[in-house]
Image (spheres, rainbow, N blue to C red):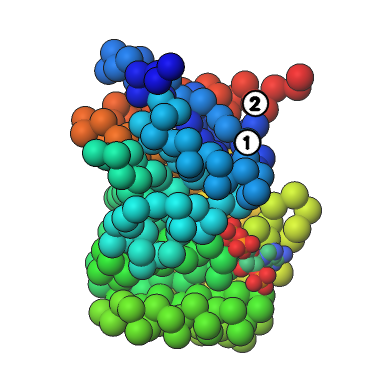
Amino acid sequence: MKQSPSYFAIIGDPVSHSLSPAMHNAAFKSLKLPYAYGKIALAKRQLPSFFKGFAESGLLGINVTVPHKENVLKYLDRLSPEARLIGAVNTVQLSKGKLIGHNTDGAGYVKSLWSESKWKPSGKKIVILGAGGAARGIVTALSLAGAKEIIIANRTPKKASRLAQELRVKLKETKWLACSLEEADLLEAFERADLLVNTSSGGMQGNALPPLPLQALPKKALVADIVYRPAQTPLLKAAKAKKLKTQGGLGMLLHQGALAFEIWTGKKAPLAAMKRALNRALKDSASPR
Ligand code: ATR
């Protein structure tokens, strides 16, 4: 029997630690919407049958996380301009029987910069650490929001150059540069940066970033990390010690979720309820089990 379509879910592998269900279920409850949001762990080989059964499954939309943000592209009917530019999807909407892919990661990040730090990309110079999937989404959105110059600094400089070269062709309003994580390269980049964002997995779980010349950053620069667990990453601690402004990664999770919610429901996301739920879920998941 066909179920009435009233479900949402996050797909990924793994998904057990995702905070998205707590955030979205709180939003549905807050607006009294008859929806529920769950988690579906899917290996890559399970994607064809998952998407084949999508229309009959009762799902109205999904979020997509690691490692499927690019894997899902071939199952979708259409892509938003941003998802096409980024080449990855984190939100899928079922609309009139068609699956539409969106990417709210980057735009959510730009929103979080404004709502948490009153920081706008227009005319600014930005240094991004990392050249993977997360960096790609964020720099694309920063460029679309008017960033003047973006320097992609990566442990493997060739990967940074390749990404900068690709974006130089697609997003001509921004000046794209690439460099290594060597101190001499970073010094030059940091001296003129308005924003430093760490998107690399360096700094997580004993995977240390090399020492960064934070002293070269202008005093008013904002230092941000997209990691939210822990809230105070080694980079943010070091930046605080240098009296620089800092921003953690929870706002990105909140605002990418809020944008997905708005795509799915056409309603303004209840940000306060979503943020409360995220903080609660984060606290619960940090407690010993
Ligand atoms: P994501 O989708 O989260 O961006 P990814 O595509 O695997 O993940 O990219 C991880 C990024 O973190 C890469 O830029 C990686 O650098 P390399 O291209 O040199 O591999 C970066 N990274 C991982 N560990 C790092 C470390 N210890 N120091 C610096 N950069 C690191």
Q: Say if 112 sits above or below 143 in the image.
A: above
Read off the residue under disc 2: 285
Q: Say if 165 sits above or below 193 in the image.
A: below
Left or right of 98? Residue 89 is right
> Can I make out residue 49 in this image?
yes
Q: From mark 1 to mark 2, how far is it between C-alphas?
A: 18 Å
- Foreground label between 1 and 2: 1
| Viewer-side residue, 140 vs 190 | 140
Q: Earlier in the sequence, mark 1 or mark 2?
A: 1
Read off the residue under disc 1: 41
Left or right of 116? Residue 95 is left
Residue 216's x, y, as percent? Answer: 52, 75
- Mark 1 is surrounded, within 10 Å at the Cα level, by few (under 14), some (14 to 19) or many (20 or more) other residues, namely some
Label 1 SS: strand
Going 43% across and 64% down the picture, which residue do you hit?
87
Q: Is ligand 1 closer than 8 angstroms to the Cβ of mark 1?
A: no
Residue 287's x, y, as percent? Answer: 70, 22
Going 48% across and 36% down the picture, which residue do you hit?
53
